[in-house]
Amino acid sequence: MRTAIIAALALPLAACAGNVGPADPDMGAPPPSLDGSCDAEAAQYHVGHDATAEMGAAILKDSGAATLRWGPPNSAWTMDYRTDRVNVRYDEAQVITEITCG
């Protein structure tokens, strides 16, 4: 009888343990390629330009990176390193101040 009661109590908990995706969509993405595809040096001439969607697309193309991460002013970033990502920081005036890979 005790086993039946424990099973009956555990059944609703098992329903809660479904296949739930991660809160952060990047966490479910496949790992980045390890071929070092980002080259920040090739995009350095964009420093000093306005941070716009068009500029972001140009930085992606010039750097060879697969993804772009914008860094708003006074914001914290995760420290994960991705060889296929270019990071673009900009200031309060929406001017690009730094371009790095990772």
Image (cartoon, grey):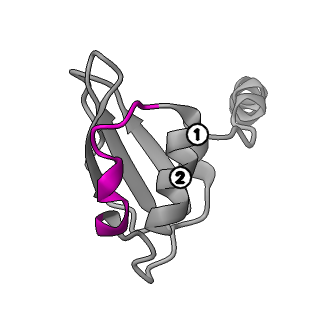
Query: 12 and 76: which one is in front?
Result: 76
Question: Which disc is residue 54 wearing?
Answer: 1
Of helix, strand and loop, which one carries label 1?
helix
Quadrant showing the C terminus? bottom left
Q: Report the residue that reaches farthest toward the bottom.
A: 35
Query: Considering only vertical position in the picture, is 55 above or below 34?
Result: above
At a point 69% along the width and 36% down the height, the residue shown is 17
Which structural element holds mark 2?
A: helix
* Amino acid type, mark 1: Glu
Quadrant position of the N terminus in the picture: top right
Horizontal relation, residue 51 to residue 11: left or right: left
Find out whether residue 48 is within the magenta segment. yes
Which residue shows up at 35% across the image and 22% down it? 94
Q: How many marks?
A: 2
| Gap between marks 2 and 1 measured at Cα | 6 Å
User: Residue at (25%, 24%) from the top-left corner?
Assistant: 91
Residue stretch in magenta: 41-51
In contact (CB < 8 Å): disc 2 and disc 1:
yes
User: Residue 8 at what x, y percent from top left?
Assistant: 78, 26
**Residue with the most extreme top position:** 92
Circle number at residue 2: none
- Residue 71 location, x and y as percent? 34, 33
Q: Is residue 63 above or below residue 69?
A: below
Is residue 4 one of those drawn in magenta? no
Q: Amino acid at mark 2?
A: Ala
Q: Residues within 10 Å of mark 1 (few under 14, many from 20)?
A: few
Q: Is residue 65 visible?
A: no
